[in-house]
């Protein structure tokens, strides 16, 4: 390594890593904006519809505002069957209940899923399933503790604890529209949650929240529209996360190269102090 003052290396790295950190921060801000935009698009489609010229009416519900005149307003308890998971044994981490043949879904599995729950991280044995609640394939699952309000559709028969709730829509309500409805209603659901060491929802509070429901044909149009829009937003978010990862790798490589002498910073001075040459690769 060339005989370079530590102060020069530190100054160089502070300057260069600050530029990279600024780029990372801008990418992180973009991700937050994408999340806000995604939530706004879902909320607008679910509560206003796709036709800007449709006659509107006052819903009388704060989080809904004005809604299409021909849509129906009702509490979730009248739109779907709601039933809670169960785990009647404490402590819940008793190893004698696990590692069997029965899939066991927890809040983390719901949070990690996109639209469908297709994998599971835990199983129950005969003893475990006897103290839990079985949910059929096609049930809409919601985390009501920890990852509060996260939803996904169960892709297989599975058991779940009391930190998860299942929903089965009644007639003329599409399962995927119900999921988007809950995504739009998340701020309203969060307002009803109990606050202890962490926020929690329960069946009664969820069931009491009022939402708006279009005719089935419009539900399908909204589902298709939101599927397309969210695919776009998630794609941009994924690309942005990849850009952040590359910047972080570049930052680490720059630090390593500077401290091991792979780049020569002997002639480097902070911009604005005096003209300087770009750091050059140290020849072998």
Image (cartoon, helix red, strand yellow):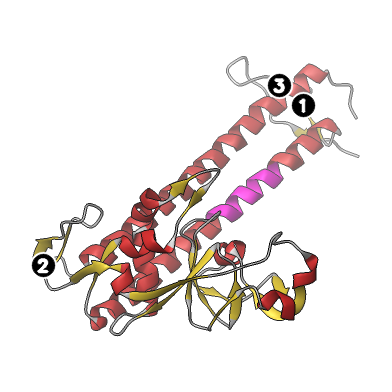
Q: Is residue 188 left or right of residue 107?
A: left
Q: How many angstroms separate mark 2 from mark 1 (CA)? A: 64 Å
Quarter of the image that includes the C terminus: top right
Q: Is residue 245 above or below residue 231?
A: above
Q: Secondary structure at mark 2?
A: loop
Give the residues in magenta. 240-250
Q: How many angstroms separate mark 2 from mark 3 (CA)? A: 60 Å
Q: How many angstroms separate mark 1 from mark 3 (CA)? A: 10 Å
Q: Is residue 30 left or right of residue 253?
A: left
**Residue at 42% across, 66% down:** 230
Q: Does residue 248 belong to the magenta stretch?
A: yes
Mark 2 closeness class: few <14, some 14–19, many ≥20 residues within 10 Å? few
Compare marks 2 and 3 and give the one earlier in the sequence: 3
Q: Which residue is mark 2?
A: 53
Q: Which mark is residue 11?
A: 3
Q: Is residue 70 left or right of residue 169?
A: left
Mark 1 closeness class: few <14, some 14–19, many ≥20 residues within 10 Å? many
Q: Which residue is mark 1?
A: 265
Q: Does residue 142 belong to the magenta stretch?
A: no
């Amino acid at each position: 390594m060339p005989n370079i003052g530590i102060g020069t290396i530190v100054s160089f790295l502070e300057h260069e890593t600050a530029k990279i950190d600024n780029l990372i921060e801008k990418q992180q801000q973009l991700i937050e904006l994408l999340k806000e935009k995604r939530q706004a698009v879902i909320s607008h489609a679910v509560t206003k519809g796709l036709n800007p010229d449709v006659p509107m009416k006052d819903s009388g519900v704060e989080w809904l505002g004005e809604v299409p005149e021909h849509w129906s307003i009702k509490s979730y308890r009248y739109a779907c069957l709601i039933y809670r998971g169960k785990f009647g044994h404490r402590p819940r981490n008793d190893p004698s209940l696990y590692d069997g043949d029965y899939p066991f879904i927890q809040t983390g599995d719901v949070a990690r899923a996109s639209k469908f729950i297709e994998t599971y991280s835990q199983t129950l044995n005969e003893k475990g399933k006897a103290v839990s609640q079985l949910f059929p394939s096609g049930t809409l699952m919601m985390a009501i503790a920890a990852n509060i309000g996260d939803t996904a559709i169960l892709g297989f028969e599975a058991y779940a604890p009391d930190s998860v709730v299942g929903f089965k829509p009644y007639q003329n309500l599409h399962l995927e529209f119900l999921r988007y409805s809950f995504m739009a209603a998340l701020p309203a659901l969060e307002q009803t949650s109990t606050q202890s060491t962490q926020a929690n929802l329960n069946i009664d509070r969820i069931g009491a929240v009022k939402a708006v429901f279009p005719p089935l044909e419009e539900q399908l149009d909204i589902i298709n529209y939101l599927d397309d829009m969210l695919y776009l937003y998630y794609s941009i978010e994924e690309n942005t996360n990849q850009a952040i990862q590359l910047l972080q790798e570049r930052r680490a490589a720059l630090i390593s190269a500077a401290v091991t002498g792979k780049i020569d910073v002997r002639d480097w001075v902070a911009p604005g102090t005096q003209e300087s040459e770009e750091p050059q690769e140290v020849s072998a």
